[in-house]
Amino acid sequence: TGIALAKKVAGQKAVEYIKAGMTVGLGTGSTAWWAIQEIGARVKAGLDINAIATSDQSYELAVALQIPLITFEEITQIDVDIDGADEVDRQLQLIKGGGGALLREKIIAAASQQMIVAVDEHKLVDTLGKFPLPVEVVVFGWEMTARKLAALGTQTVLREKNGQPFITDNGNYIIDCAFNAITDPATLHTRLNAIPGVAENGLFVNYAHTVIVGYENGTVNTLY
Ligand code: DER
């Protein structure tokens, strides 16, 4: 379908930023999936890189594709991080976390020289917030944490999977917060992370250097 093609061309285009010898961050989600597939093909063809994954899901995919993997114990920096997003606004601010990997994604993005974001055209918005903002919270006292999140002016929903609370790779819960319109993501980010019990939130403020947009007609556009 058009959307799958949009994700494919965006994910594959993002891989052009990877050069031999680099350490690469592997994002999470269906768009990052295409980038990881392309990286796997280039590694098979001889590209010499090391990678670090933003989720168990992406780690397993990299293992299957025989992409060399390293840990933070071994690296000093990540050269390029390729990841997706749920929303991108006109200042290239992001909402991420739809796949529940936002904590490790933000740690890796923050450790990277360059974050390349690959999205389909439907992720572009004028104002962030139509997509509920994922917030990762520790399990202890999550109900109180949810009340403090709600006090910031949002409806809060504990994310579930198969009728149970969704558990992140880090053993935490995700609370999805419907803010509807986030006009000052930097301020909201600070307020969210000041709440005891909040591990991280899905606002990526001033992280994205380049956003690659794939369209349903198979074309791509690069935003800086
Ligand atoms: O969870 C995440 O942050 C993912 O990157 C997500 O935001 C993008 O997922 P998609 O590429 O499957 O739409």
Image (cartoon, rainbow, N blue to C red):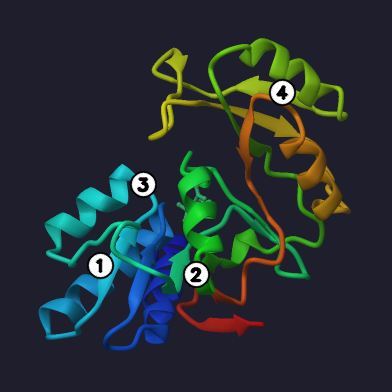
Image spot of residue 42 (x, y percent): 20, 81
Above or below for 114 versus 93:
below
- Identify which residue is drawn at 45% across, 78% down: 218
> SS at mark 1?
helix
Q: Is residue 71 left or right of residue 135?
A: left
Q: What amino acid type is highlighted by mark number 4?
A: Thr
Q: Earlier in the sequence, mark 4 or mark 2?
A: 2
Return the residue nearer the eye: 212 or 56.
56
Rounded to the nearest angstrom, the CA distance separating label 4 from label 3 is 24 Å
Residue 156 disc label: 4
Above or below for 57 versus 61:
above
Quarter of the rendering occupied by the C terminus: bottom right
Residue 55 disc label: 3
Rounded to the nearest angstrom, the CA distance separating label 4 from label 2 is 31 Å
Q: What amino acid type is highlighted by mark number 1?
A: Gln
Q: Residues within 10 Å of mark 1 (few under 14, many from 20)?
A: some
Residue 84 disc label: none
Rounded to the nearest angstrom, the CA distance separating label 3 from label 2 is 16 Å
Q: Earlier in the sequence, mark 4 or mark 3?
A: 3
Query: Which residue is denoted by mark 2 in the rendering?
Result: 112
Rounded to the nearest angstrom, the CA distance separating label 1 from label 2 is 21 Å
